[in-house]
Image (tube, rainbow, N blue to C red):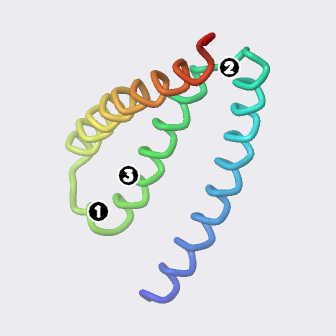
């Protein structure tokens, strides 16, 4: 069973990495053109955090009740948005006129 879960994780991770690379490339092109969609940075953080959480709900956090799962989702979304803020600041510094 552990081997199957590890294989599923690696497959999901590979798909996720490919998607993130494609979105990152598009965002970088937007930054280079001076028109970044910074909201996408927040979306990526939230999507990544929730994907990890859902995977944990299927394994080590499977014992949590629905109310606890929802509370954890809300907390993780807030954390992801806060972390995204730091990356947005970095992107703004990169595209700021010098």
Measured as percent of width and height from the top left, residue 41 is found at 55, 30
Which residue lies at the image location 46% right of the left edge and 30% below the top edge?
87
The answer to whether residue 74 is left or right of residue 40 is: left
Q: Which mark is residue 36?
A: 2
Towards the viewer: 89 or 70:
89
Q: Which of pointers 3 and 2 lies earlier in the amino acid sequence?
A: 2
Q: CA distance from mark 1 to mark 3?
A: 11 Å
Badge 2 density bin: few <14, some 14–19, many ≥20, Cα 10 Å:
some
Residues under numbered marks 1 and 2 in contact, where contact means CB atoms less than 8 Å apart? no
Measured as percent of width and height from the top left, residue 32 is found at 75, 25
Q: Nearer the viewer, mark 3 or mark 2?
A: 2
Towards the viewer: 19 or 29:
29
Q: Quadrant of residue 92?
A: top right
- SS label for mark 3: helix
Measured as percent of width and height from the top left, residue 9 is found at 52, 71
Q: Quadrant of residue 52?
A: bottom left
Q: CA distance from mark 3 to mark 2?
A: 28 Å
The answer to whether residue 44 is left or right of residue 57 is: right
Q: Which of pointers 1 and 3 lies earlier in the amino acid sequence?
A: 3
Q: Which mark is residue 62?
A: 1
Badge 1 density bin: few <14, some 14–19, many ≥20, Cα 10 Å:
few
Q: CA distance from mark 1 to mark 2?
A: 38 Å
- SS label for mark 1: loop
Q: Which residue is mark 3?
A: 53
Image height check: is 9 above or below 47? below
């Amino acid at each position: 069973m552990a081997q199957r879960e590890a294989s599923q994780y690696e497959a999901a991770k590979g798909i996720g990495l490919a998607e993130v690379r494609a979105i990152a490339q598009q965002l970088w092109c937007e930054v280079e053109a001076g028109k970044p969609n910074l909201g996408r940075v927040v979306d990526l953080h939230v999507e990544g955090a929730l994907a990890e959480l859902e995977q944990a709900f299927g394994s080590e956090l499977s014992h949590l009740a629905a109310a606890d799962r929802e509370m954890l989702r809300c907390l993780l979304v807030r954390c992801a948005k806060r972390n995204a803020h730091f990356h947005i600041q970095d992107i703004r510094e990169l595209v700021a006129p010098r």
